Amino acid sequence: MTDLSNEMFKTIDPERRGTTSEEVISQLREMIHRGDLRPGDRLPPERDLAKMLGVSRPTLRAGIRSLAAVGVLQSRQGAGTFVVKADGPPSLDSSPLRLMASLHGFTSAEMFEARQALEMAVAGLAAERATGDQMATMAEEVAGMFASLDDPEQFLVHDVRFHQTVAAASGNRILTSLMNMVATILFDTRIKTVKRATDLKESAEMHRHVYRAIREHDPEAARHAMSAHLSKAQKAWEAETPEADGPDSNNSEGNGAGLAP
Amino acid sequence: MTDLSNEMFKTIDPERRGTTSEEVISQLREMIHRGDLRPGDRLPPERDLAKMLGVSRPTLRAGIRSLAAVGVLQSRQGAGTFVVKADGPPSLDSSPLRLMASLHGFTSAEMFEARQALEMAVAGLAAERATGDQMATMAEEVAGMFASLDDPEQFLVHDVRFHQTVAAASGNRILTSLMNMVATILFDTRIKTVKRATDLKESAEMHRHVYRAIREHDPEAARHAMSAHLSKAQKAWEAETPEADGPDSNNSEGNGAGLAP
DNA sequence: CTTGTTAAATGGTTAGACCTTTGAGACTCG
DNA sequence: CGAGTCTCAAAGGTCTAACCATTTAACAAG
């Protein structure tokens, strides 16, 4: 943990541009940008930090809350406020996108298309860069799919893990995050679709094609295989979902996309 | 504006799952999902809304602030709190991604790559779907680039508008938003690069190739032209930026991506 | 009818107090 | 002496009550 006790905090008041709490946000962001606050660090107690910044506690809390909302900070009652730990694939919160989907009336076709574009991109990159370990993991997940053709829920677990492994193999954490963001929103939909298990065998087969293309380091083939897979998945979903236009599921507060390391 | 005065608000207290303010967030989100709150609507005054929901004003404000942080609500002192207007291209706030970049030490190579993947995708879709008007706009912007070969700043304006037009022509607002999110972060970098105007003519030429491919409804050509353009741009940037690894610019609070309708 | 003034409405901020959860040190018992 | 339990300080979560700053619109004067 970094040493936070000394005088790294500037008081706020001088000619502040916007509101006080905005200034607090800027201060905290700057600390993070500068590296004074590193992932996993604990912030000083609110009471102390408020005094250091020269603002009241509610105002400080407003700033903290804003940063918590975008997934940068995390507060635990009784424990403290922490800079979010950066282990595993960094994940952007998908609730903003979800809200925007409601607000603008995004169609699920758009969502599928966006996911397809992102998955194609990562598949292509994965074909260029996947390590042996990652390819082995992919192979295992494909095998897992074939092994759970009669267990849709288990199948979906392997499915998700396969896609996340491909994303990780792309070596691009930004694309991975964006992909997860979109995929998370479609997840609730998928879990319903997959339960009415139509063509799990065909789906597993298509995943295997993707895997093979990646193993052969053939980006174009990987992109095409992934594209074909997702087009098929979308068609299956559309066939089973007569009219429902927007995948307008409900709450589920936190950032999803759990399930795989 | 929707009628908000009647009894659409449920009180909070019964067996709340998480914290009170989280419950407030859920309530507000649900109103938006249900369509009780539509883009542009004004929320009831905080004091009233707090009473309706059965929480104190600070707690309500905490919830509002969280939703404001992700770009769903917007408060203006003296005026009120509004559901963000959904005109033009919906834009996700890029500050979360920016923070995450600092937190995880994203390289600018990753950013460029992500942008390239997204731009290729939208270019391909635009080639399939661009309307006559949109293609006309693209042509105008390309012409504008050629007309401002000696004015780097003006050139950049046309550059940005061209890319946003292509994104709009893709017909996929999600990909457009994601692209803007990434592009916004790279913008500060670009404005510096373009000022040292190296190959504006060549750049304009490459934009013209993209335009032509779109006009010919040739997705593959559009993807390739866009890819070539961005690869070139990245190389130019790398050549002029010796060591700087992360495009770690500073504040700029609001969501950027302005400049073009 | 225009314009300047004023007052009400509304979000922003502060202060201080109390509650709930957490986590670690102290304590007791085996 | 060790393991389990207890207690309590620390920290975030919430509330009340007030005051400040800004915006909006009504209203009066010209």
Image (cartoon, coloured by chain):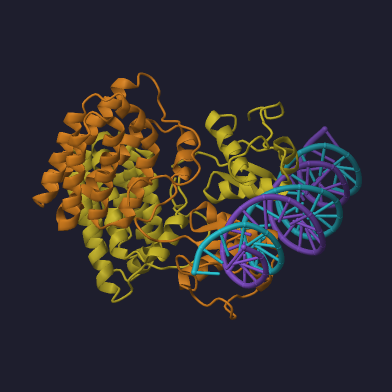
Chain colours: A yellow, B orange, C cyan, D purple
As drawn, A78 above or below B86: above
What number of labels is visible? Answer: 0
Which residue sits furthest top? Answer: B242
Which residue sits furthest bottom? Answer: B6
The percent coordinates of residue B245 (x first, y second) are 40, 25
The percent coordinates of residue B50 (x first, y second) are 66, 67
Residue A154 appears left or right of B62: left
Answer yes or no: is residue A130 visible: no
Q: Quadrant of the N terminus of chain A?
A: top right
Of residues A162 and B227, the one drawn nearer to the viewer in this rendering: B227
Of residues A201 and B242, the one drawn nearer to the viewer in this rendering: B242
Q: Quadrant of the C terminus of chain A?
A: top left
Residue B123 appears left or right of A13: left
Of residues A39 and B111, the one drawn nearer to the viewer in this rendering: B111
Q: Would you identify the image quadrant in which residue B45 lies?
A: bottom right
As drawn, A149 above or below B243: below
Which residue sits furthest left? Answer: B216
Of residues B139 and B21, the one drawn nearer to the viewer in this rendering: B139
Q: Residue at x 46, y 41 (%)?
A: A88
Answer yes or no: is residue B236 visible: yes
Q: Would you identify the image quadrant in which residue B80 lies?
A: bottom right
The percent coordinates of residue A199 (x first, y second) are 24, 65
The percent coordinates of residue A173 (x first, y second) are 38, 39
Q: Residue at x 40, y 38 (%)?
A: B185
Residue B86 appears left or right of A147: right
Residue A182 appears left or right of A253: left
